[in-house]
Image (spheres, helix red, strand yellow):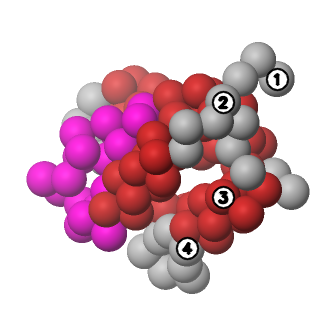
Amino acid sequence: MVNFKEDLMESLIDLLGVLSEHKQRHNVNYFIGTIKNMIAIIQNIENPELPNECIEKLRKMYKSMFFPRDGLSDFYILDSDATYMTKCNTQFSSLLNRIDALLEE
């Protein structure tokens, strides 16, 4: 992996952008707040590598957004343009998969 810290930060910022873009139609304030907190934790670590306890905390925070109902796993972007909607949801799923892979134990 090139740089875990940078990759994770970039992925979280991308996820924050997607959720912020759709907050008018979805209640995503909890997710936005959690992601901002995760980004702040990463920014406050001066080392180029994140300590294991920090990674574990980030992992728990991320997993907290996937509760049984109405969590990020249920998030779906709706649009009248089916092609756009499919593209957005595919990108969103890919982004979640990328973050999952980075935070894997």
Q: Which residue is mark 1?
A: 1
Q: Amino acid at mark 1?
A: Met
- Give the alpha-carbon distance from disc 3 to disc 2, as whole Å: 13 Å
Which of the two discs, 1 and 3, sits closer to the camera?
Answer: 3
Badge 4 amino acid: Ser
Provide residue 86's location: percent of width, then percent of height. 46, 33
Q: Are marks 3 and 2 in contact (CB under 8 Å)?
A: no
Give the Cα distance between marks 4 and 2: 26 Å
The residue beneath circle 3 is 54
Q: How many residues crowd around disc 1 within 10 Å: few (fewer than 14), some, or many (20 or more)?
A: few
Quadrant of the snapshot with the N terminus? top right
> For residue 16, what is the image quadrant?
top left
Which is the main secondary structure of the residues drawn in magenta? Answer: helix
Q: Which residues are magenta?
A: 13-32
From the viewer's perspective, tell me whether residue 104 is left or right of residue 63: right
Mark 4, secondary structure of its residue: loop
- Disc 2 target residue: 48
- Viewed as shown, does residue 84 lie left or right of 54? left
Q: Dot 4, crowdedness within 10 Å: few (<14), some or many (≥20)?
A: few
* Residue at horizontal 32 percent and vertical 69 percent from the top: 30
Callout 3 crowding tier (Cα within 10 Å): few <14, some 14–19, many ≥20: some
Disc 1 and disc 4 in contact, CB within 8 angstroms: no
